[in-house]
Image (cartoon, grey):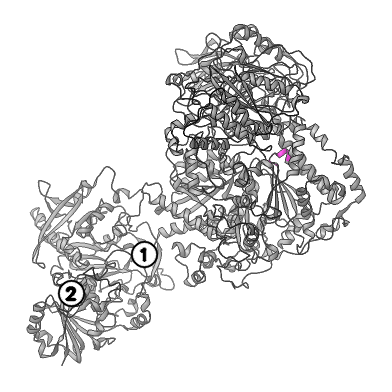
């Protein structure tokens, strides 16, 4: 049998004898095959595709005998080459060997269409044609030539793993095969049969590698392939007699690897593949094998594969020993069954399809196929053939005992380094003969639980025992790492001795109940407690141990026995097995467990446990199979007829009558009458035709349901959104939300048709497609299905199309939602896509490189059982996990009709309610029946037995209720009650014919089909066919329902569409039916509210992982009425909150959503509006009000019925009342808007006309429609685990979380029920690792940044939450692309001057003569100056209309109107904007540090300040070309200026200066896009104290830093310094360029002064003369560059002092300006001629209105200001920065005055005791005048005919007071004030040009007031004297004031007086 148990050398004689016996057994041909159930389905590492596929259903198991003796083919080949192969057999069965005989050569088989010499993909393999082609040969592979008898002239080229080829001596070829096709490149053929089929060898005999692989292929001197030496299979002919029969080949069978080799791809945890054939069942073969095991899953068992008819002993599978490298984690699975200090472990070899780890040395290849196993004939116990005395070694487990005190001390490095275990002689005493017929004689197949020490070799009928490493890890505590010990609070001296381990194990086994099986996690916790509890570790002497052990066992009442031996464990095992085989007469007191202790002086104490309890042994053996394996096992038993004995037992009723005859008899008696549904009793019959036409009344409640989003879903959606924002804000460039303007998505669901319909229905009902703008209302209904993709064979084409879309639309953010992502997380390498069921698809799709790399794709994995995604290797950052909120509001008062989530934990807790009929039950009567049957049929899998019994129970229950009442006593009460309720509920009063759904979970498809067929047949024969439906719920098929039931459903829905059929389980709401739900896992389908019973009696001890168990119970989870729960809880206090519950207002349903919106404003308030600021720009106020008026706006979702399409109307039928059941909503919401009748839809896709039940809410929850929790009936094993703390066993949450992961350490802290959400995730990430076949096993160490995980309990509403997330994500993206710009109505046009000058509207540039003729509009009309004083002019506007409005509007503080505008590609951006194009512009390159900016001082004399000013420039290296430096390069000389005459396409001549403060993040300082990427000079002018902040955010910008004295100054100072600097620079440049021969006036004199809030620029679209009929023109975006270039190219530009553009407002879009140019105020964005305005300065003291003041002075100096009316500037509303956030506070902090300081307190009498303030004097003065001028100038208030005269300056005196500005300079242009009488005079810091003579020219009203403002008291007095004011004005001493500053802050003084 090839390599035997690694490293064990046998004597030649022993081998020979053994070999001969094997040979004889192989040749025997008597008897029919009768395989035994536990023969494991072993799966070797196979194809790149998927295990399951390759692993055919157990139905495929070959029934052929050994080589050539094919019982079906009936011919035996005696070809010597074929017989040579007993040892190295590659005989591989074809995929369905017992269904097909080899086709005669040349016949047309399936693949006969492919010619010989080519592979099945049609690629040429012949050496002659591909000799010269380059062939890629993977490492470790050889090219060999194969010969086909059908084309003897050709050699076919193959690539074969050299480990499976012999060495030069013809030896050491590993059994099995591993090869690749060099034609099509398909890799991973594990069976030569399969490979020979693929390369079309067309063999009539069994394919063998020895026979058909003939030559090595080598390259000749030309580099072409040619035939090389023969492959030396020389040993094969003499194999029968060779002494090498069982030589182990350690070099090739052991491997150094620290990787865990758990079962392949979750499908096989059977550790060794016993054959080279595809993993079809060996028709027989006994074998024992070991392997790692986790939670009884990853088990490698001593797996009996039965014995031959001749009762020969059969070769055991030799296991490969694998030495785990020193890096070994402590994973239980990492150490497999070899319990030795040297960390040597037997490794399960049914690996996934992974190549050896990189660390594997060539000698230690990881046994890809595992040692193979022959298929032998099965045996009949009756066949009497003598047994030759042969023995077969089973892998012995040989620990090297180090220090006797501790179990498993860590071995020396030498033993680890050795890749091979040194062979050790085996003594005779260490072999055990397994008695034959053990299973038949004792009815039990004993399970040996490996403990500590050496297990013996087994031979004989080894198929009769199983070896399980279930508890092995519990004894491995010595392998804990230091860090794990620390976490557990242990020290290395607390390790338990072997003796303690034995006693603890005994104690544990003794207290297990008769219906419990040992659980690894339980024993681990006991061991951990023992370690923590007894630090001293009491020493137990060898003599004490047996005595103490027996004492421990004595409490068990005989269920645990102790056997003590002194030589070896084998002795005890042998003794126990023999006593067991001696037959039933000795078995009266058979113990459940026998603990065998070997007190050996040499090896110290060793022990193992022999499990003899029938229930326990079977449960442990079955628990070692993965779900896939046991489903195959069941399918195999059904196909091969092993169940016939059982089936015949069930042909009779419990009373002994023939079931079928009774049914036929009853059927005849009925004479075609059927039981009438909906009314009367089951005894009333009616004609079968009548009821078909009966239809029940429509269900008003169904019609009144509405669809909506609930608070918890909204919370989760927001959490998802905020996490997406965190990813974007993390600064890692992983997600740039700013670039996306659209959201698209695709939902991946497990392969279930019903789930696809269900998800598509949710998408339709939520209206998300319309909201995202992906579909319009008419198409959304039809197209929702294309957004949902099943993970089946077609997924690749759909994903390719999706990924193509992702690549083509870089500005769309795609979200790939992987729903139920815990289902099938097999690695793509382990999955198979070529045969059968597909696996590994999710990994191929979600983890493919394209998906990982796409920067515009988010992956959202959604799961109710996320544990398998939360391993140590998880791809999802723990920060990217969103957990369903766990707030439990049951404690607060709630209306009785509120719905709350009722989840798994609630089911566990409900056991403490103390109610008469618990909702979580165990059917003990059923369990007793099962127990009896299990003992009778030890060969069958328990699920087969349970299924047959369950079918019988339902069958007899139906009979008992109709034809045979006498059967009642033979049916379990649970079954009877359920069936009675099913039949009778529809006829109860008030039910309107509606009944209950009963869900029966039958995982095996074959059993489920059998159940459906049987129940349907019995139902029909009993005349119940109109009472309830029986349906098969299979993921692979659509629902099928008879027409009469469909008509009933249609009638309830009021649906008139004849074509309608139910597509989802929810569509069956109210229909009485039995659903037989099949499939490996439940896939997340939602069931209707009418589901009342969930029958999980088939879910037993095979479901021993948390996910497997909880997802079954998850079927019953739903939302229930809160009062139901509260009533039930009378006996218990309310529980703590738990993660399964949500806010009670989350009324219901897995996916709650609101109606789709057609952009209708009402539905727009979908919860995201108010909360997230994600309102749409066109959202009308009126529509937000209904939402905001309630306490929770997101709850109320109205729908504008007018927007509903007919199809949607039908789907929603009627929207029902506004959920008056929800206390948070307005209770009297109007119902009249909604239609109460249904309307039919002509659309064919009206599959969703009905309302879903789970996801919707009744308009009212009447007493009759209270929703109760569903009743769950469990098997005893599952019940024990779910009953949690109340039971004696651990709770389900302590189990291994998922079969695809393993615990990373033998001991761990106990997981508690309170560990939820992030804590639970942390726990699993620390303590679990992915198995080798898991998709995350080789996950990259870097977490995927754009992947999120949403976890929430089953059926809680996750779909609704993620659809809402998509909606608010879209709103946010639009919001990010939108900006709030000021949109104030412009009052200009109606006031525009009508002048003689008319310029054609489409003139591009102004004519200077025309502009000179235009009058200057003195009044600043911009809305930003609405709060400022109007400037008096000859034609005053009707001014005070605004002010009156303001008066009443005081509380709003005159907020300016803004409008949301979509950013264009020419926008200016703030620091949050990142994109590929401009990141170099705004962000520091990692290599360039801040130090690369050079700091330059620049000094000049300011005549205005009268002193030298020093400014600092920070100039990045890249910007130095804009400056002139001296020859040394260190001193800054000037800023380069171009010439007026320079013309260049891309040139921008004017430097741009932006004064900015407090807006380093929010200021729009990124002009890259606004400038279209053109080179420009942009200088930020910042205050000194803010310079570091601006440098940080804008490292590539030039900063101009103002002197420190301006730190508290206003914007006037910045503008003043910019202008002073620019003029000084102009002079320097003129001097510099004059030297180069340039005329002085040719140097460009303009600068741009631009605010930091200018965001967009627009212009009217150039018209083609066809203006719109209403006189309006379209406005288009233009870039800042285009605007500047246009302004700069104005003819005679140097003659203009200032140019500017209009401010945008939405009203402008409706009318083109009458005049393209105006003379008026310019601000915000100004092209300023610093040469012409040399003598006009900005007022450097000003905080506000400095631009109006400056404009008035420029204009009165006779200079031209020109505004280009065809351009508009949009200004963004930035709520922070500028000078807005200046807070005035008291100077002395001690003063505890919490009240805000009001403007009247800003001034005080000089020397008064008033609170002095900490604010600049000028700031206080301006604010005082703005607010309190009505006190200073009472005559001027709202008196536009008598303005206040202000000389040389403009200060705002509030909007109620108009100001007349007069310039005192000679030759200045002033308003004609003849006949004007002023109501006041304001003299502000007047200079020497103001003289008393000037003032005498003006007339004042009697009682007019004067205000003179000066820098200090002395200048105030001097001014009054100099201007002779006392002649006309009366002053009083008390009329002198100062700003409320202390003297060092230099207050301003002013004096008021009255005109006399």
Image vertical order of residue 1690 relative to residue 1013, above or below:
below
Instruction: Tell me the quadrant of the picture where the C terminus can be found.
Output: bottom left
The crowd level at tag 1 (other Cα within 10 Å; few <14, some 14-19, many 20+) is: few
Residue 462 visible? The answer is no
Which SS class for mark 1? loop
Chain part drawn in magenta = 1002-1007
Q: Is residue 778 left or right of residue 1529?
A: right
* Residue 1005 shown in magenta: yes
First of labels 2, 1 by sequence position: 1
Rendering coords of residue 312 (x, y %): 71, 15
Q: Nearer the viewer, residue 1028 or 449?
A: 449
Which SS class for mark 2? helix
Q: CA distance from mark 2 to mark 1?
A: 35 Å
Q: Nearer the viewer, residue 91 or 425?
A: 425
- Label disc, if present, on residue 1253 of the rendered structure: none
Image vertical order of residue 127 relative to residue 488, above or below:
above
Rendering coords of residue 44 (x, y %): 59, 26
Count of numbered marks: 2
- The residue pinned by badge 1 equals 1662
- The residue pinned by badge 2 equals 1753
Instruction: Tell me the quadrant of the picture where the N terminus can be found.
Output: top right
Residue located at (59% from left, 37% from top): 839
Residue 430 visible? The answer is yes
Rendering coords of residue 1315 (x, y %): 51, 47
């Amino acid at each position: 049998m090839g390599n035997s148990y690694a490293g064990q050398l046998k004597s030649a004689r022993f081998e020979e004898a053994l070999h001969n016996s094997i040979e004889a057994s192989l040749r025997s041909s008597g008897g029919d095959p009768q395989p035994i159930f536990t023969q494991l389905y072993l799966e070797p590492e196979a194809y790149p595709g998927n295990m399951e596929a390759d692993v055919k259903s157990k139905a495929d198991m070959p029934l052929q005998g050994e080589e050539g003796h094919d019982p079906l083919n009936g011919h035996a080949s005696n070809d010597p080459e074929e017989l040579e192969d007993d040892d190295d057999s590659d005989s591989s069965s074809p995929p369905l060997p017992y269904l097909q005989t080899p086709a005669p050569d040349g016949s047309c088989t399936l693949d006969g269409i492919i010619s010989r010499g080519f592979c099945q993909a049609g690629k040429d393999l012949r050496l002659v044609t591909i000799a010269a082609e380059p062939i890629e040969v993977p490492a470790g592979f050889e090219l060999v030539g194969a010969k086909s008898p059908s084309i003897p002239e050709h050699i076919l080229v193959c690539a074969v793993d050299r480990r499976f080829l012999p060495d030069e001596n013809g030896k050491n070829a590993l059994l099995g095969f591993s090869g690749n096709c060099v034609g099509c490149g398909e890799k991973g053929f594990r069976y030569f049969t399969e490979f020979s089929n693929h390369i079309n060898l067309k063999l009539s005999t069994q394919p063998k590698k020895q026979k058909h692989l003939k030559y090595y292929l080598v390259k000749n001197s030309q580099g072409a392939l040619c035939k090389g030496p023969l492959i030396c299979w020389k040993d094969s002919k003499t194999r029968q007699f060779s002494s090498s029969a069982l030589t182990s080949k350690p070099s090739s069978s052991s491997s150094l690897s620290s990787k865990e080799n758990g079962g392949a791809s979750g499908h096989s945890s059977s550790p060794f593949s016993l054959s080279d054939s595809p993993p079809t069942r060996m028709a027989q073969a006994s074998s024992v094998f070991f392997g790692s095991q986790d939670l009884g899953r990853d088990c490698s068992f001593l797996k009996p594969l039965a014995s031959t008819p001749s009762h020969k002993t059969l070769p055991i599978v030799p296991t490969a020993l694998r030495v785990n490298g020193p890096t070994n984690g402590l994973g239980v699975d990492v150490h497999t069954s070899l319990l030795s200090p040297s960390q040597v472990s037997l490794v399960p070899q049914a690996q996934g399809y992974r190549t050896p780890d990189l660390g594997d040395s060539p000698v230690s290849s990881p046994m890809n196929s595992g040692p193979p196993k022959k298929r032998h004939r099965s045996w009949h116990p009756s066949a009497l053939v003598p047994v030759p005395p042969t023995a077969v070694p089973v892998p012995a487990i040989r620990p090297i005992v180090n220090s006797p005190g501790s179990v498993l001390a860590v071995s020396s490095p030498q033993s680890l380094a050795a890749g091979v275990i040194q062979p050790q002689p085996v003594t005779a005493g260490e072999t055990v003969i397994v008695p034959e017929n053990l299973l038949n004689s004792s009815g039990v197949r004993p399970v040996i639980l490996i403990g500590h020490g050496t297990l013996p070799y087994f031979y004989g009928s080894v198929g009769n025992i199983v070896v399980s490493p279930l508890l092995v890890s519990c004894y491995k505590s010595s392998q804990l790492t230091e860090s794990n010990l620390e976490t557990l609070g242990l020290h290395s001296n607390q390790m338990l001795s072997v003796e303690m381990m034995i006693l603890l194990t005994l104690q544990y086994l003794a207290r297990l109940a008769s219906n419990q099986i040992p659980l690894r996690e339980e024993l681990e916790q006991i061991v951990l407690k023992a370690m923590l509890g007894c630090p001293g570790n009491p020493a137990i002497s060898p003599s004490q141990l047996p005595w103490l052990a027996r004492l421990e066992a004595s409490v068990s009442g005989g269920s645990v026995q102790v056997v003590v031996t002194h030589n070896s464990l084998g002795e005890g095992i042998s003794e126990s097995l023999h006593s067991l085989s001696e037959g039933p007469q000795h078995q009266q007191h058979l113990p459940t467990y026998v603990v065998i202790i070997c007190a050996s002086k040499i090896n110290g104490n060793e022990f193992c446990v022999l499990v003899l309890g029938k229930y326990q042994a079977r449960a442990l053996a079955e628990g070692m199979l993965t779900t896939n394996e046991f489903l195959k096992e069941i399918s195999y038993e059904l196909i091969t007829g092993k169940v016939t004995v059982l089936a015949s037992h069930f042909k009779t009723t419990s009373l002994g009558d023939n079931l079928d005859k009774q049914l036929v008899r009853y059927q005849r008696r009925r004479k075609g009458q059927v039981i009438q549904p909906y009314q009367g009793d089951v005894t009333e019959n009616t004609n079968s035709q009548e009821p078909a036409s009966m239809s029940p009344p429509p269900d008003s409640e169904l019609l009144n349901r509405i669809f909506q989003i609930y608070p918890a879903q909204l919370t989760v959606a927001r959490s998802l959104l905020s996490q997406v924002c965190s990813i974007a804000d993390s600064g890692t460039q992983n997600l740039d939300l700013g670039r996306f303007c659209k959201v698209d998505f695709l939902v991946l669901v497990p392969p279930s048709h019903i789930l696809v319909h269900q998800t598509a229905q949710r998408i339709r009902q939520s209206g998300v497609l319309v909201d995202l703008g992906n579909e319009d209302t008419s198409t959304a209904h039809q197209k929702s299905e294309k957004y949902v993709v099943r993970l089946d064979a077609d997924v690749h084409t759909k994903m390719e199309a999706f990924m193509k879309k992702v690549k083509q639309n870089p500005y769309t953010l795609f979200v790939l939602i992987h729903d139920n992502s815990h289902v099938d997380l097999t690695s793509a390498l382990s999955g198979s896509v070529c045969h059968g069921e597909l696996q590994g698809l999710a990994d191929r799709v979600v983890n493919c490189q394209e998906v990982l790399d796409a920067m515009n794709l988010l992956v959202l994995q959604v799961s109710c059982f996320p544990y398998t995604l939360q391993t140590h290797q998880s791809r999802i950052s723990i920060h990217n996990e969103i957990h369903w909120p766990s707030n439990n509001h049951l404690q607060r008062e709630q209306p009785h009709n509120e719905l709350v989530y009722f989840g798994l934990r609630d089911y566990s807790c409900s056991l403490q309610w103390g109610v008469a009929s618990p909702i979580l039950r165990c059917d003990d009567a059923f369990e007793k029946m099962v127990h009896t049957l299990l003992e009778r049929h030890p060969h069958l899998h328990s699920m087969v037995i349970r299924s047959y019994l369950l079918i019988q129970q339902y069958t007899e229950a139906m009979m008992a209720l109709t034809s045979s009442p006498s059967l009642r006593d033979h049916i379990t009460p649970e079954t009877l009650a359920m069936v009675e309720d099913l039949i009778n509920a529809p006829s109860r009063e008030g039910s309107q014919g509606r009944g209950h759904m009963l869900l029966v979970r039958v995982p095996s498809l074959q059993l489920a089909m059998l159940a459906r067929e049987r129940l349907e047949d019995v139902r029909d024969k009993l005349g119940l066919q109109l009472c309830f439906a029986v349906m098969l719920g299979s993921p692979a098929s659509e629902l099928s329902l008879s027409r009469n039931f469909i008509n009933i459903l249609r009638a309830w829905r009021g649906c008139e569409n004849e074509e309608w059929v139910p597509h989802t389980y929810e569509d069956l709401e109210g229909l009485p039916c039995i659903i037989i739900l099949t499939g490996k896992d439940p896939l997340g389908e939602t069931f209707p509210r009418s589901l009342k019973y969930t029958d999980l009696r088939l879910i037993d001890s095979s479901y021993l992982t948390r996910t497997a168990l909880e997802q079954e119970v998850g079927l019953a989870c739903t939302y229930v009425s809160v009062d139901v729960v509260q009533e039930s809880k009378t006996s218990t206090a309310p529980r703590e909150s738990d993660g399964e519950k949500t806010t009670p207002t989350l009324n219901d349903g897995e996916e709650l959503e609101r109606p789709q919106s057609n952009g209708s404003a009402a539905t727009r308030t979908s919860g995201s509006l108010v909360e997230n600021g994600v309102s749409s720009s066109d959202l009308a106020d009126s529509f937000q009000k209904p939402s905001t008026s309630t306490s929770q706006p997101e709850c109320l979702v109205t729908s504008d019925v007018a927007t509903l399409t007919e199809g949607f109307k039908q789907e929603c039928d009627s929207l029902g009342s506004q959920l008056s059941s929800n206390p948070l909503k307005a209770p009297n919401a109007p119902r009249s808007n909604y239609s109460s009748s249904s309307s039919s839809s002509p659309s064919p896709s009206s599959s969703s006309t009905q309302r879903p039940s789970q996801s919707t809410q009744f308009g009212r929850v009447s007493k009759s429609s209270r929703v109760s929790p569903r009743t769950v009936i469990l098997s005893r094993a599952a019940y024990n685990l779910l009953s949690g703390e109340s039971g004696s066993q651990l709770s389900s949450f302590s189990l291994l979380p998922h079969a695809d992961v393993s615990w990373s350490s033998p001991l761990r802290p106990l997981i508690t029920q309170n560990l939820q959400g992030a804590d639970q995730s942390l726990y699993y990430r620390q303590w679990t690792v992915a198995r080798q076949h898991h998709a995350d096993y080789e996950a990259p160490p870097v977490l995927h940044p754009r992947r999120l995980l949403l976890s929430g309990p089953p059926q809680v509403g996750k779909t609704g939450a993620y659809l809402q997330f998509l909606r608010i994500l879209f709103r946010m993206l639009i919001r990010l692309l939108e900006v709030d710009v000021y949109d104030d109505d412009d009052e200009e046009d109606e006031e525009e001057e009508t002048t003689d000058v008319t310029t054609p509207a489409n003139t591009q540039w102004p004519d200077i003569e025309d502009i000179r003729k235009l009058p200057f509009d003195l009044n600043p009309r911009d809305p930003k100056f609405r709060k400022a004083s109007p400037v008096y002019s000859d034609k005053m506007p009707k001014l005070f209309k605004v002010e009156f409005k303001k008066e009443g509007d005081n509380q709003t503080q005159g907020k300016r109107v803004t409008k949301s505008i979509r950013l264009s590609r020419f926008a200016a951006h703030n620091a949050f904007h990142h994109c590929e194009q401009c990141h170099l512009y705004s962000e520091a390159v990692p290599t360039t540090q801040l130090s690369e900016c050079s700091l330059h001082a620049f000094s000049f004399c300011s005549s205005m300040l009268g002193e030298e000013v020093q400014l600092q420039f920070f100039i990045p290296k890249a910007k130095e070309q804009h400056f002139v430096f001296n020859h040394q390069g260190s001193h800054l000389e000037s800023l380069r200026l171009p010439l007026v005459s320079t013309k260049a396409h891309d040139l921008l001549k004017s430097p741009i200066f932006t004064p900015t403060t407090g807006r380093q993040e929010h200021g729009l300082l990124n002009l890259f896009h606004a400038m279209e990427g053109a080179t420009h000079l942009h200088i930020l002018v910042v205050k000194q104290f803010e310079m570091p902040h601006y440098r940080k955010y804008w490292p590539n910008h030039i900063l101009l830093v103002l002197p420190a004295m301006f730190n508290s100054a206003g914007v006037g100072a910045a503008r003043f310094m910019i202008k002073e600097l620019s003029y000084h620079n102009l002079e320097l440049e003129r001097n510099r360029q004059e030297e180069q021969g340039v005329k002085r006036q040719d140097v460009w004199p303009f600068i741009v002064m631009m605010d930091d809030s200018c965001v967009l620029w627009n212009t009217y679209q150039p018209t083609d003369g066809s203006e719109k009929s209403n006189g309006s023109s379209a406005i288009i975006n233009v870039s800042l560059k285009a605007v500047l270039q246009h302004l700069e190219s104005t003819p005679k530009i140097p003659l203009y002092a200032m140019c500017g553009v209009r401010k945008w407002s939405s009203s402008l879009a409706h009318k083109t300006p009458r005049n393209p140019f105006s003379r008026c105020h310019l601000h915000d964005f100004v092209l300023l001629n610093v040469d012409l305005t040399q003598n006009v300065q900005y007022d450097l003291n000003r905080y506000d209105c400095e631009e109006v003041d400056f404009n008035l002075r420029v204009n009165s100096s006779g200079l031209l200001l020109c505004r280009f009316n065809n351009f508009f500037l949009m200004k963004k509303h930035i709520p922070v920065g500028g000078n807005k956030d200046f807070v005035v506070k008291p100077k002395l902090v001690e003063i505890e005055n919490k009240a805000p300081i009001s403007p009247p307190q800003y001034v005080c009498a000089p020397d008064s005791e008033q609170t002095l303030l900490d604010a600049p004097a000028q700031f206080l003065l301006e604010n005082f005048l703005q607010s309190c001028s009505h006190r200073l100038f009472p005559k001027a208030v709202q008196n536009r005919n008598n303005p206040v005269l202000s000389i040389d300056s403009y200060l705002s005196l509030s909007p109620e007071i108009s100001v007349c500005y007069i310039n005192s300079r000679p030759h200045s242009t002033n308003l004609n004030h003849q006949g004007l009488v002023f109501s006041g005079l304001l003299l502000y810091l007047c200079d020497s040009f103001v003289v008393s003579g000037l003032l005498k020219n003006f007339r004042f009203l009697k009682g007019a007031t004067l205000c003179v403002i000066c820098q200090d008291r002395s200048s105030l007095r001097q001014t009054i004297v100099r201007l002779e004011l006392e002649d006309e004005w009366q002053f009083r001493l008390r009329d002198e004031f100062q700003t409320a500053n202390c003297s060092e802050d230099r207050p301003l003084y002013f004096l008021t007086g009255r005109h006399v």
